[in-house]
């Protein structure tokens, strides 16, 4: 161990204090400080408590030295000279004076110049009150302007995308948004145009700034030049209250600040969590708050009567639900009750529901996945954190398109690839957002990934690469039109060849990792999600409980979902909205939504972070755990949970792997607490026998886009128009084979079903395969999917 | 002494002096391979290839071939700055010549493209560079055409490409046209432009081209004229080269004279010894001020250079001396103003150029340059006040804080402030917008005052920012 070694050395002959080889001694404003080698002056000064004003500098992006606001006098032995402190690293003996008359004059000069053409419409500017230009004008500006010319004029805000508006009069050309788009997001859709005094940020003609990450530019713009539609003119910063929380729109677990005013959610801002999101958010996470205050939110419990759903009291609804559960147990035994869901809530909700299901009702038939996930055993494999993945020399992707499903993980891996820290080897049925950055992409025909993996590992260059050090396998479901078996087989092939490789699960739903870990998984002999759905379809489920689950939208096999919903004798739903599935429930409990309840969540790495309640619940809705607690009590067991903290503590005390996740530890860990990996039942290697694909057929790939018809997106007015809509995509060279024009409606059929969709060409789709995005408007590709089949082959015909 | 002009080389005036880079200009087919070969063309390359690369590099170092692009840095020294054993490494030829008043590189490309190509090859050989990019200003259609044609001929004849002249030495030359931005002449902006990006200068450090240049690789950027010197040097040796000119500025230098002289044009003068008086007044060169008018002022080194007065006429073309006198030798463009010149208008013309050409990156250049131009606009239009004149200097101080270089003047009783200035910007475009304003206002304030509006009582006071923001 390294610690022992260094102890040995110091006890032998070295002095007790080994000088830090990275320490650089500098003098800042007359005081000596020890900075780190390579630190920029602006950063070293900040660490030393000296703030140097800045606009273009951003810690997460490369410096450009554009605004000249950070000019300070630096003496490197040749006399003081003005230097942009965001561009120069510290050097031994450097003397920095941020307050010398020359430094001050330069800073005041830049402020005056920036304000010369600035419209100063602060009273109607969204940034007013949290504006670095305002703040630094006060702190480092000259206090008055000598500019008497007419100011520069541009058309007031122009939309540069569906979400973002640009006010070029306010722009100070700091290059932050453009740098972000190019360097961080990889969507260089905004750039500078024109020159001199008319330089401006703009999109390319007819190409909007339609990046999944556009909202970040609004957050980092140091003025009010960029504004986002969902927040424009909604609040003044000083009226906002804020609580730090975690985004649960997907399972990356980006840290966010939830902001509200007068009990209304108004904005989410990214919080810089070093191990997770580096301050960035995707637009779906950032703007998803709109759905929470949607008018259609459930406000009271509902029970089904002959006339349909009727509002009722919590007391009556709970009594009705308990009756349904006891009737079910009486009719078919405890295992005729099944619980699906939990991945959309927090750890505490899932834990309470797991306790209710397993311990109070006594059913083993519990699942947090919807036949679209991975065997839970994958969670028991040696796991890598996001940081470890983004630092591993080799990252193997056996995963869905991360840009679509886990967007900020995509940013982190893209960064690792473009900065040459990691080489990405991608196995995919279709080109993904990361294909551009992958060192190797191996396209496979759905179902054949295990062979593809074995063949790739046998090539000399890939074999040499994986031998270079750490290997992390990012694993998830790239194709909903195939079962998890081929992916699991490929994972086994990888692990067999690379026994030291670690795994990062690419499961998408916000708290799927937490829900499974705290118990929302099959008990001994219990059914997994597919088993539960099959049992329900076969009439073996007396009572199906949906906890934030909408099988009709979530389960890839649409037919199975419909049959399951029809076959389940009774249905209880806990949900925020009436959706396709909760509409069929006998009892519906209105659930408190995100930001209406506190608790903790677990991300893909197993990192537990806190969730904050920022607004009061909608109507009479309650957090899921309260519903579970109430039902348990009525069923004769007091779970003993009086508050969320009780449950958090109880999880720490009883759930394997969560030992360190105590409320106290969480309170002191802004970046959360990592759970340890608990070995679960081993994953059996599936044997896969694929029927030969008929050459007339296309092998089907169904996968998700970031924006779809999921409830969170469709209830957000800003996001719902961004869903691309349904179509069947084939490679442009395969269009002729279909024999239809692009845009024309075609029949897509399996022996089981036929759906009609417009035909589209897309060269990210591999030849011989067809791709249909999941859960979009138009026909449902789920109708073609058979959960029992390994792959899905479809015939595409013109009408 | 005689001076000749050639119809086929408009703007060029030949004389009896040594001709290092213009020797072929007398032929009207000077741009063809045939003419080049008939007049020692590629003999310099042949000579270089017969020696070791280090040897050739040493010869260039000994000859002290100063960069002719503006900074005057010795080429041989520059070539030695690249880290060894990093491949690939590039030569980038700066043919973006757009400094106001400068039009010598254009002639060298139009009249003798083979000399330039030969120079590129010698540089690549000596400095161990694996590929050459020749960047020609977008507006120079004829130069582009001639260099392209010459390159085709040279490739066909085996002077460029693989195993040049049967040797182990291989190099490719790639042509690239600019899209019309002055700032792209700055070497790091030129590299950005070559990479397909918007031409905006990079920060030095860390982006010193010799270390991190084109595509992040070691890159030597040299001016067209600098490289055009190499064939002659290879044929005649460093001793012959240093025998011409002064010890610190050997060889000849192309100087482009424009403005109020009898015979404006490009002259190949002896470097380091020829004085401005020789250049402007002798019959060998410009032959005096037009209409025998009185000289009022001149710009000694391209539009970016602080102005000189008749007081400075006896200064030679020697960077160090010009610098001490408050200006710079720059790009070798002399712009002459006789006593009829409207000085504020002249300053405005230059400032407008630099304000327009700002790439928009640095706040002081982008905002300050245009601010200067708008105040000057007002002054020239007769709407200025005393406050505006002070304001010009105050705005200038935000671009260039501290003392600004200027010439001495007996008439005004002021001493010279030597070059260089301090600056808050990345490159010299920002300061260049201020330079003409500062020179004109320092040396001819009376001319500005004569244009001021007669109502001196109108106070132009600052508007407190605080009042607006609240
Ligand atoms: C704003 C600006 C414009 C420049 N324009 C040119 C130019 O048009 N041609 C040129 O050769 N050098 C120009 N330079 C100088 C180049 O940056 C560089 O120093 C030169 O090309 C190096 O070649 P040399 O060492 O052979 O002189 C310019 C520099 C600046 C700052
Ligand atoms: S829009 Fe904002 S972030 Fe973008 S360059 Fe302008 S001021 Fe900077
Ligand atoms: S990547 Fe996931 S966790 Fe992060 S902001 Fe987007 S939806 Fe939220
Ligand atoms: S000084 Fe002007 S031209 Fe040069 S980098 Fe700055 S803004 Fe661009
Ligand atoms: S913060 Fe350093 S130049 Fe902008």
Image: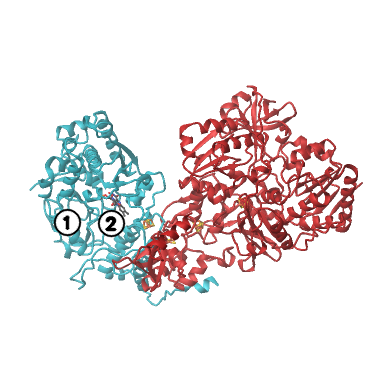
In the image shown, does A499 or A402 lie closer to the viewer?
Answer: A499
**Is the shortest distance between ligand 1 and the CB of mark 1 under 8 Å?**
no
Q: Which chain is red?
A: A
Which residue is nearer to you in this view: A379 or B283? A379
Image quadrant where one finds the C terminus of chain B: bottom right
In the image, A663: left or right of A580?
A: left
- Which quadrant holds residue B423? bottom left
Quickly name the residue at label 1: B317
Badge 1 marks a residue whose secondary structure is loop
- Seen from this angle, which residue lies furthest bottom? B457
Number of on-image labels: 2
Chain B: colour as depicted? cyan
* Residue at 80% across, 56% down: A627
Q: Residue A732: give x, y in percent of width and height.
A: 57, 29
Which residue is farthest right? A306
Q: Quadrant of residue B301?
A: bottom left
Label 2 crowd (10 A; few <14 / some 14-19 / many >=20): many
Determine the image quadrant of residue A71: bottom left
The chain to which mark 2 is attached is B
Colour logic = by chain
Q: Which residue does the numbered mark 2 point to in the structure image?
A: B303
Numbered disc 2: secondary structure: loop
Location of residue A529 with respect to B185 vertically, above or below = above
In the image, A538 versus B303, the foreground residue is: A538
Say which chain tag 1 marks.
Answer: B
């Amino acid at each position: 161990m390294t610690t022992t070694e260094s102890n040995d050395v110091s006890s032998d002959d070295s002095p007790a204090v080994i000088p830090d080889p990275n320490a650089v001694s500098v003098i800042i404003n007359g005081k000596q400080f020890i900075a780190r080698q390579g630190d920029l002056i602006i950063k070293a000064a900040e660490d030393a408590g000296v703030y140097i004003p800045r606009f273009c500098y951003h810690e997460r992006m490369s410096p450009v030295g554009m605004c000249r606001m950070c000019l300070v006098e630096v003496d490197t032995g040749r006399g003081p000279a003005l230097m942009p402190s965001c561009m120069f690293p510290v050097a031994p003996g450097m003397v920095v004076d941020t307050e010398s008359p020359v430094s001050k004059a330069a800073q005041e000069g830049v402020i005056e110049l920036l304000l010369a053409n600035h419209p100063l419409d602060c009273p109607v500017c969204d940034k007013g009150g949290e504006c670095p230009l305002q703040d630094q004008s006060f702190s480092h500006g000259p206090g008055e302007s000598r500019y008497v010319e007419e100011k520069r004029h541009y058309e007031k805000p122009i939309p540069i995308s569906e979400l973002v508006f640009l006010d070029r009069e306010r722009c100070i050309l700091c290059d932050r948004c453009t740098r972000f788009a190019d360097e961080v997001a990889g969507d260089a859709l905004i750039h500078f145009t024109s020159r001199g005094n008319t330089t401006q940020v703009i999109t390319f003609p007819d190409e909007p700034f339609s990046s999944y990450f556009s909202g970040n530019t609004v957050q980092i713009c140091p003025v009010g030049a960029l504004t986002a539609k969902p927040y424009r003119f909604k609040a003044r910063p000083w009226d906002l209250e804020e609580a730090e929380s975690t985004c649960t729109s997907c399972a990356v677990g980006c840290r966010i600040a939830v902001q509200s005013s007068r009990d209304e959610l108004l904005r989410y801002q990214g919080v810089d969590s070093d191990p997770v999101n580096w301050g960035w958010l995707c637009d779906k996470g950032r703007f998803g708050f709109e759905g929470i205050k949607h008018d259609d939110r459930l406000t009271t419990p509902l029970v089904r009567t002959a006339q349909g759903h009727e509002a009722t009291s919590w007391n009556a609804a709970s009594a009705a639900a308990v009756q349904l559960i006891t009737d079910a147990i009486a009719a078919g035994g405890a295992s005729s009750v099944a619980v699906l869901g939990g991945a959309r809530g927090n750890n505490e909700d899932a834990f309470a529901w797991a306790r209710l299901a397993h311990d109070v009702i006594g059913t083993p038939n519990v699942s947090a996945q919807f036949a679209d996930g991975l065997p839970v055993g994958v969670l028991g494999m040696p796991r890598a954190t996001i940081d470890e993945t983004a630092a591993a020399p080799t990252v193997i992707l056996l995963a869905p398109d991360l840009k679509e499903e886990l967007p900020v993980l995509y940013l982190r891996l893209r960064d690792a690839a473009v900065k040459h820290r990691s080489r990405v080897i991608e196995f995919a049925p279709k080109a993904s957002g990361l294909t551009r950055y992958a060192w190797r992409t191996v396209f496979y025909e759905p179902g054949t990934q295990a062979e593809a993996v074995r063949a790739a590992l046998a090539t000399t260059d890939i074999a040499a690469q994986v031998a270079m050090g750490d290997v992390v396998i990012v694993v998830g479901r790239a194709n909903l039109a195939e079962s998890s078996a081929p992916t699991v087989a490929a994972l086994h092939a990888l692990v067999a060849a690379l026994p030291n490789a670690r795994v990062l699960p690419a499961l998408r739903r916000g708290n799927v990792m937490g829900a499974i870990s705290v118990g929302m998984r099959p008990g001994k002999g219990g059914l997994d999600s597919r088993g539960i759905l099959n049992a329900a379809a076969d009439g073996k489920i007396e009572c199906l409980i949906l906890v934030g689950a909408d099988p009709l939208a979530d389960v890839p096999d649409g037919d199975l979902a419909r049959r399951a919903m029809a076959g389940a004798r009774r249905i209880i739903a806990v949900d925020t909205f009436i959706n396709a599935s909760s509409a069929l429930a006998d009892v519906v409990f209105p659930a408190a939504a995100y930001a209406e309840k506190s608790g903790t969540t677990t991300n893909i790495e197993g990192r537990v972070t806190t969730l904050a309640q920022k607004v009061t619940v909608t109507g009479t809705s309650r957090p899921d755990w309260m519903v579970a607690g109430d039902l348990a009590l009525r069923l004769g067991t007091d779970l003993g949970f009086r508050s969320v903290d009780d449950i958090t503590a109880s999880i720490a005390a009883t759930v394997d792997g969560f030992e360190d996740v105590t409320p106290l530890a969480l309170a002191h860990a802004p970046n959360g607490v990592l759970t340890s990996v608990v070995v679960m039942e081993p994953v059996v290697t599936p044997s896969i026998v694929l029927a030969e694909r008929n050459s007339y057929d296309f092998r089907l790939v169904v996968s998700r886009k970031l924006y779809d018809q999921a409830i969170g997106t469709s209830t957000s007015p800003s996001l719902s128009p961004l869903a691309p809509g349904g179509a069947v995509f084939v490679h442009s060279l395969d269009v002729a084979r279909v024999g239809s024009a692009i845009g024309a409606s075609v029949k897509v059929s399996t022996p089981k079903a036929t759906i009609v969709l417009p035909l589209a060409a897309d060269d990210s789709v591999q030849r011989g395969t067809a791709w249909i995005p999941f859960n979009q408007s138009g026909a449902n590709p789920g109708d073609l999917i058979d959960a029992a089949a390994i792959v899905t082959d479809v015939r595409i015909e013109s009408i | 002494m005689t001076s000749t002009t050639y119809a086929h080389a408009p703007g060029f005036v030949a004389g009896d002096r040594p001709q290092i880079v213009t020797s072929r200009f007398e032929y009207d087919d000077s741009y063809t391979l045939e003419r080049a070969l008939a007049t020692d063309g590629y003999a310099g390359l042949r000579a270089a290839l017969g020696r070791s690369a280090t040897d050739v590099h040493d010869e260039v170092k000994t000859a002290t071939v100063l960069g002719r692009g503006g900074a005057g840095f010795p080429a041989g020294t520059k070539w030695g700055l690249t880290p060894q054993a990093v491949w690939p490494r590039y030569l980038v030829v700066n043919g973006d010549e757009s400094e106001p008043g400068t039009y010598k590189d254009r002639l060298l490309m139009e009249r003798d493209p083979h000399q330039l190509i030969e120079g590129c090859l010698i540089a690549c050989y000596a400095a161990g560079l694996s590929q050459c990019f020749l960047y020609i200003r977008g507006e120079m259609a004829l130069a582009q055409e001639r260099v392209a044609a010459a390159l085709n001929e040279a490739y066909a004849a085996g002077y460029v490409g693989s195993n040049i002249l049967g040797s182990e030495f291989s190099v490719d030359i790639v042509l690239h046209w600019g899209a019309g931005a002055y700032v792209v002449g700055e070497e790091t902006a030129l590299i950005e432009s070559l990479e397909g990006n918007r031409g905006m200068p990079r920060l030095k450090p860390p982006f010193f081209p010799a270390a991190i240049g084109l595509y992040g690789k070691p890159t030597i950027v040299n001016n067209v004229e600098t490289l055009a010197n190499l064939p002659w040097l290879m044929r005649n040796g460093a001793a012959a080269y240093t025998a011409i000119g002064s010890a610190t500025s050997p060889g000849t230098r192309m100087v482009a004279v424009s403005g109020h002289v009898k015979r404006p044009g490009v002259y190949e003068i002896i470097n380091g010894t020829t004085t401005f008086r020789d250049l402007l007044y002798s019959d060998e060169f410009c032959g005096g001020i037009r209409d025998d008018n009185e000289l009022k002022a001149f710009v000694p080194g391209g539009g970016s250079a602080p102005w000189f007065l008749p007081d400075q006429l006896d200064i030679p073309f020697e960077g160090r001396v010009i610098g001490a006198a408050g200006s710079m030798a720059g790009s070798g463009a002399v712009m002459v103003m006789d006593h009829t010149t409207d000085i504020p208008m002249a300053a405005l013309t230059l400032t407008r150029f630099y304000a327009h050409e700002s790439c928009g990156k640095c706040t002081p250049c982008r905002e300050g340059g245009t601010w200067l131009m708008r105040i000057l606009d007002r002054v020239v239009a007769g709407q200025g006040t005393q406050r505006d004149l002070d304001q010009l200097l105050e705005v200038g101080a935000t671009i260039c804080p501290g003392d600004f270089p200027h010439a001495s003047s007996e008439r005004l009783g002021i001493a010279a402030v030597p070059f260089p200035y301090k600056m808050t910007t990345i490159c010299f475009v920002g300061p260049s917008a201020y330079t003409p304003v500062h020179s004109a206002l320092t040396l001819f304030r009376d001319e500005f005052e004569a244009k001021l509006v007669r109502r001196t009582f109108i106070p132009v006071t600052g508007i407190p920012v605080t009042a607006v923001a609240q």
